[in-house]
Image (cartoon, rainbow, N blue to C red):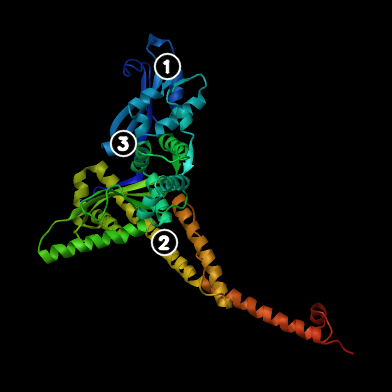
Amino acid sequence: MEKSKMGENAASHIEITFYTAECMEFVRYGEYRDGLGTLKEALKYYDEIPADRLNAGKGIGIHVSDPEENGFLQDFPLLMGKTVDLDLLGDSHGISRYPQILKIVKELAKAREDITVVDSCGLLKKDGITIEASELARRINALQRKIDPDSYSQFYPDAKKQEKKVMMKLLTEDGRKEYLSWLKAGHMVLPDGARAEAEEISRLLEHGQVRWPEVTPPFVFICWSETYELEDGDVIPLEEADPLFERLDRARVKENKENNTGGYDKTKFIIYYQSNGEPSTYEGCQDFGDGDGSLIEHIEGFARFYLETEEGRQVLKDMGEERSRAMQEDCEYIRDGFLPYLKYHCNLYAIEKALLEEQEAEKEIPVVTDRQEARKEYQRDMLAFIQESRRALNQGGDLPVMPDIRDYEETKEKSAYREHVMKEIKAEAEGYGMTVEEYAKNGYEPKMR
């Protein structure tokens, strides 16, 4: 059965609270408060502890509750005396696993100028480097082509499609590591003029924040798969992954039926998407051969199992109250929010694909009628509607209203009719030796002689 994790990207689904202690070495020795919800609240209680009490070194720490660790509570020292040690937080994997901690350190350093930050790696400065994934993908794609143009043309005949794949990979941690390893490979021979660019891209990958483009549709990362048709670490746009999963599932079902065998090809995947402007993920596992169908159908079936079947409800009961409540909330979100979101994105892609194909075909046909001109205006506005819809889906807000082709045709017909009438009126006015204004003022009648 699939194990699914809903929520924001990686560590953003964690719960962070603060504690203050009179002694940061032995936190339960002396005055201690925990369960503090904000840094501001923690600083308040920190200030109330006399600095010289017991000479024990007061401070502030962070509690991290991580669903991936079954809610296990991890402690990280934030402020010891008047020092924040970012090197220590890095060594303890706090910052790399939970980037929120670095944001908290920045907030603390900004709030208290008397605090010393130990930061030999310059993490606070490096955290300010940001670059949009599409721009970084363009630079990596250009570098790949420059390093080996022959191999590039052979393996990536569609440069635009390859650049899109690079961009999607850059939005995953594994993808960024992959490109960083490639750039740092000692055996790679760089042509003249490429070394400086490679070093700059490496710096951005290692220390920068890769920003999601606002209109990026969801995509699927293949963690691993038992079918040879899916490559571990590959990224696939949702609109391609959905029918691909259906084909692989049907093929294995057919194979099992024809050979009178069982079995399935297990595939672990992560869907990367944006929710209210924040990078988010859905993790799951589909068994090709179980008859679940497409990727979206599989996710829908997963939610229905818990929400609509007796067996699923019993499984929820057996989980215990807290886990059962969390799983039910996840499934309700899948049903009411996530699935409509995925389906809307797929529908937008289908409309966009049809429009672009239509535009490509029309390049060979000159525009000769008002109806064709109206259609072109409609196509242009529809493509803008698709982009605005993606932005609203990803960033939050109201979806735009879809243009109606009838409005364009009717407006164009009225405009054409008006132009025809005005030409006739102008010709009549000139025939009477009058201007159009004089003719109109005279009730569209000739002057009396």
Give SS at disc 1. loop
Is residue 130 left or right of 271 when viewed as pictured? right
Work out which quarter of the rendered image holds the C terminus and state it. Answer: bottom right
Tell me if residue 297 can be seen.
Answer: no
Instruction: Residue at 36% x, 32% y: name it.
Output: 96
| Label 3 Cα crowd, 10 Å radius (few <14 / some 14-19 / many 20+) | some
| Label 1 Cα crowd, 10 Å radius (few <14 / some 14-19 / many 20+) | some
1 or 3: tag closer to the N-terminus:
3
- Vertical position of residue 91 compared to residue 267: above or below: above
Q: CA distance from mark 2 to mark 1?
A: 55 Å
Identity of the residue furthest to the right in this view: 449
Q: Single out the mark in the foreground, 3 or 2.
A: 2
- Vertical position of residue 106 compared to residue 301: above or below: above
Front-lying residue, 118 or 343: 118
Identity of the residue furthest to the left in this view: 260
Tell whether label 2 touches label 3 (CB within 8 Å). Answer: no
x and y percent of residue 239 in the render?
36, 59
Numbered mark located on residue 66 in the image: 3
Give SS at disc 3. strand
Amino acid at dot 3: Asp
x and y percent of residue 446 in the render?
83, 87
3 or 2: tag closer to the N-terminus:
3
Q: CA distance from mark 1 to mark 3?
A: 27 Å
Amino acid at dot 1: Gly
Front-lying residue, 403 or 189: 189
2 or 1: tag closer to the N-terminus:
1
x and y percent of residue 402 in the render?
50, 65
Give SS at disc 2. helix
Indicate the quadrant where residue 338 lies.
Answer: bottom left
Q: Which residue is mark 2?
A: 349
Q: Which residue is mark 1?
A: 81
Instruction: Residue at 37% x, 41% y: name it.
Output: 179
